[in-house]
Amino acid sequence: MQRVDIKVGFQCNNRCRFCVQGNKREEYPDKTTKEIKRILREARKKHEALVFTGGEPTIRKDLPDLVKYAKELDFKVIQIQTNGRMFAYKKFCENLIKKGANEFALALHGHNAKLHDSLTTVPGSFKQSTTGIKNLKSLGQRILMNTVITKPNYRYLPQIAKLLVSLGVDQFQFAFIHINHILLENKKLIDEIVPRKSKIMSYVRKGLQIGIDAGVRVMTEAIPYCFMKGYEDYIAEKGIPNGSVYDAEWSIEDYGEYRRREGKLKGPNCSKCKYFKICEGPWKEYPQIFGWEEFKPVETKNTKI
């Protein structure tokens, strides 16, 4: 099913220390209701699945109207990608579901308030987001979770996994931080926020296994095959749906191709790896900072892809 992501604006009620959008909230105004409805009509010609994203779409007062309009256009999937805080209000949940939202992608970056709130920089955000998960779950909704892997939280990925399983989510993903230009230009922030991939993997595997054992769909994002021995089936890039993205003042027709061509990078030894043709490599900013030493080609002997 072809999917379209519409970034409705970049304002947000969190200010996450790792946010890939950087300072877009200061650079670009939010799209107007009229503009988004025009994009919805245009997008529906080729797409059946829709993601409202940003920024934080739930802080827009017109979101229920936009969801209703998308439903009238007969989008089959209407996903809200969100930090989940507004879903702490059950009536808000009920209204969006009534209007037509039928899938919810939330984010949680810690197993407790101290860790999560320190990364979002908003006291109380953990309580609101977990309450939001519980509210949506009580209303029978499909819940997909994302945790961005950072230096402060990677050791707690198993605890985060246990929490998500206990909350009854349908899917969770561990996504390695995508370094924005603000981080790229600040060594102190890099040291505080970005872990080495080789350091995180034992915790990633433990977290994934907790979900697997519980029957929850799990995956990683932006972690190449050479780090994922034994867990190759859980690499998200294998199954990310084709689709388009309407970003700030531009659109991308084929985001998968754009991500592989412009966003990711392969190193000097990657061509020796048996996964070379299907692996996308890391986000390009990571080897720009840390180099390629950690990336070890997987031998092809007696193996099949």
Image (cartoon, grey):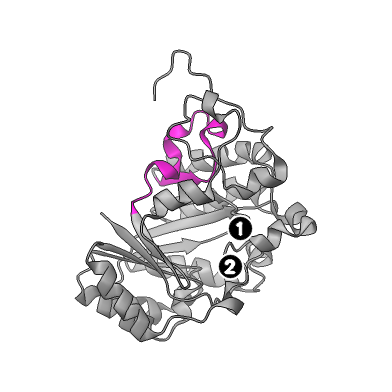
Q: Residues within 10 Å of mark 1 (few under 14, many from 20)?
A: many
Three-letter amino acid code at disc 2?
Phe
Residue contact at pointers 1 and 2, CB within 8 angstroms: yes
Task: Residue 66 in the image: state x and y as whole percent.
Answer: 32, 80
Which residue is drawn at the image coordinates 56% and 52% (left, top)? Answer: 160
In this picture, residue 226 sits left or right of residue 17? left
Task: Residue 122 in the image: state x and y as whole percent.
Answer: 64, 73
Q: Residue furthest right?
A: 188
Q: Looking at the rendering, in which quadrant would you find the N terminus?
A: bottom left
Which residue is drawn at the image coordinates 64% and 40% (left, top)? Answer: 197
Residue 102, quarter of the rendered image? bottom left
Q: Looking at the rendering, in which quadrant would you find the C terminus?
A: top left
Q: Is residue 204 visible?
A: yes
In this view, the residue in front, 133 or 287, is: 287
Task: Residue 136 in the image: state x and y as whole percent.
Answer: 38, 68
Residue holding disc 2:
126
- Distance between mark 1 and mark 2 Cα atoms: 8 Å
Label 1 residue SS: loop
Residue 46, quarter of the rendered image? bottom left
In this view, the residue in front, 29 or 118, is: 29
Q: Which residues are magenta?
A: 216-242
Residue holding disc 1:
110
